Structure formats: structure tokens, C-alpha cells
Image (cartoon, grey):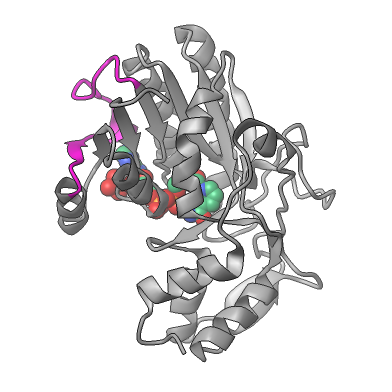
Amino acid sequence: MQRDATIVVTGATGQVGRAVATALADEHHVIAAARFGDAAVRAELEAAGVVCVPVDLAAGALDALPDAPTYVVHMAVAKTGDWRADLDANAQGLGRLLARCRGARAALVCSTTGVYADTGAEPYAEDAPLGDNHGTSPYLPTYSISKIAAEEVARLSATLWDLPVTIARLNVPYGDTGGWPAIMLDLARAGIPTEVPIGGDARYAPIHTDDVCAMVGPLLDAATVPGTVVNWGGPDVVSVRAWTDYLTERTGVEIPLVETATAIPSVVPDLTRQRALVGEAQVRWRDGFDRMLAARYPDLVR
Ligand SMILES: NC(=O)c1ccc[n+]([C@@H]2O[C@H](COP(=O)([O-])OP(=O)(O)OC[C@H]3O[C@@H](n4cnc5c(N)ncnc54)[C@H](OP(=O)(O)O)[C@@H]3O)[C@@H](O)[C@H]2O)c1
């Protein structure tokens, strides 16, 4: 990764993008592109040295962004559940972003392992069939399809603009800025159970945001035309039941699980390509969960 780079980071107000933008700002000139509905988050980013440029990826004009930053790191995602809005932001918005920043040296487009068809043939390698993995979820009905559309836009953009791209399919990120395990804890404290698939145990490869941040540079270095596709996960395969038990052990909060036909299915990624391209994530899940709990729930931790 080039030193002292100018990096456009989208989604910098979000769970993962915020950690990434802040970490990159230690050594680079970071331009955060988001709508910045939360003034406090914007102020935090600016305090970390990030330049904030308001843009709406779903609504066009991106002229305020540089046309030739060194890199683009795309972490934005729309999950409104409205098909038109989410396809506009996730697919067309990415197309407009990469067209605007086409003079970049490379782009990292964050995708999801939620693009894999739920065939049960885990672990899923990058050439596994794609499908509407999250389609049954009432909370994320547009997610898988709009992310598949986004991946294709990324590949087309790579070819159109001769812009090397890495499409990294992230599994379950977590850390100081939150994540699914933290959401489960928050829901439980509000008396709301977490849905899990019927008759089985959903398993994932949770990845701490420190590892996510550390891998951004190597993933940019792995970018190609017409696009490098790679799974992006942590060092351990962990079931939702196992991490639930651990969260309860560490906090005393009982987290009710309810089996439903609409729960997000198990997605264990095959990380062979990740290991070859950028190496293994370092933070083991119990250590990472402990750090997340200490950062977010200091009063709860036993
Ligand atoms: N979190 C997970 O469990 C998970 C799992 C697998 C993959 N991923 C992937 O990781 C990446 C980051 O996800 P996340 O969970 O950190 O997202 P998030 O917390 O939901 O944040 C979404 C970000 O996208 C921005 N955004 C949404 N609509 C926008 C629009 N129309 N124009 C401009 N910006 C817009 C939001 O900024 P404003 O609201 O300020 O505009 C926010 O910064 C995504 O690619 C996601 O698919 C996440």
C-alpha cells in the first residue's frame, strides 16, 4: 500500500467503516463520504483527522469527491428494505462512485458472505453458487440480491475504467464499534430474542475490526482487473449458540434464542484464498469478544 495516500472511504459513519476510516487516518489523508445524519459521529471522525464530504450514493452528484484519489475503500451499504432505494445506493451508487474516482490506483469493495446460496455445502469458497441468502429475513430482504448486484457493478467498473478492484466478502465483523454479537446483547437487554435457524446451529467466522483494518492495505494490493474476489473472515469458526453462551458467561445477561424459518442461515466461509492473499486474522474470538465487551459494556463485564 502506498504511504501517505489519499483514500476515499464510504460508509465511514457505519459500524465497520468508522473503524476503518479512523485507523487509516493515522497514516493517510482520509476523505469520508457519507450522509452524516449523526453529527456526533462526524465530529468524532473530524477529531481523528478525517475530512468529511457529505454525499448520498443513491442520489447522484459525487463531484465533491476527488477523481483520482490513491485508493477507494467502499464500506457503505443501504439496508432500508426498499428494493429501489437499496439497488440505487448499493449497485448504481457504487457504479457512480467508481466512475467518479476512476483515476484511483485500486479500490476495495466490501461485500458479504451473505451472497452465497444457502446450499448447506459449507465452507463456501468464492466460486460457490450465489443466491438470496438473507432473503427470508424480514429485516434484510434486499441485502443479498443488492450486494450481488453491487459485486457485478464493481467488476464491470474495473473493466470499464481499468481500475483494479478487490471484492472482499466479509463474514461477521465485530469490535469496539459493535457488531451482530453486540446487537444480540442489546436486544436481549430490551427483552427481544435473537432468531436462529430451525433444527441446527448457525456458524460463522467472526472477525475483529482490528483485523479488518489491518487487512485493508493488503486487500488493496491484491486488487486486479477484472476484480479479485475473496472471502474475509476471522480465525475461528464459532456457532451463534457458542458465542451466546460466552456473552452470557461474561455479562450475566441471558440471551434468548428462538428458532425460526426466517433466521439468517449459517455461513462458514472457506478462507483458503484469504490466507494466500493477505494472511490469517490474528484476534481469536474469545479475546476479541472480551475486548468488545470491555469497550462497550464496561459495567456489565464480570
Ligand atoms: N455488519 C455486518 O455484520 C456485516 C456483515 C457482512 C458484511 N458487511 C459489509 O460490511 C460493510 C459495512 O457494513 P456496516 O455494518 O458497517 O454498515 P452500517 O453500520 O449499516 O453503515 C452503513 C454505512 O453506509 C452509509 N450509507 C448508507 N446509505 C448511504 C447512502 N445512500 N449514501 C451514502 N452513504 C450511505 C451510512 O452512512 P450515512 O447513514 O451517514 O449516510 C453508513 O456509514 C458493508 O459492505 C456490509 O455489507 C457487514
Q: Position of residue 86 (x, y in %)?
A: 44, 41
Name the residue rendered at 29%, 14% in the picture.
68
The image quarter in which residue 156 lies: top right
Task: Answer yes or no: is residue 80 visible.
Answer: no
Q: Is residue 56 magenta?
A: yes
Which residue in the rendered view is the most extreme toward the right?
121
Vertical placement of 59 versus 286: above or below? Answer: above
- Residue 126, compared with residue 103, is above or below; it is below
Quarter holding the N terminus is: top left
The quadrant where residue 199 appears: bottom right
Between 256 and 288, the one nearer to me in the picture: 288
Query: For the image shown, how many numbered marks are present on the structure?
Result: 0
131 relative position to 107: left or right:
right
Image coordinates of residue 127 in percent, x first then y, are: 76, 31
Magenta residues, start to end: 48-70
Q: Position of residue 128 (x, y in %)?
A: 78, 36
Q: Main secondary structure of the magenta part?
A: loop
Residue 17 lies, in percent from the top left, at 37, 46
Whether residue 290 is visible: yes
Q: Is residue 193 magenta?
A: no
Residue found at x 64% / y 41%: 115
Q: Residue at x 49, y 46 (%)?
A: 212
Q: Which residue is drawn at the image coordinates 60% and 84% (left, top)?
A: 256
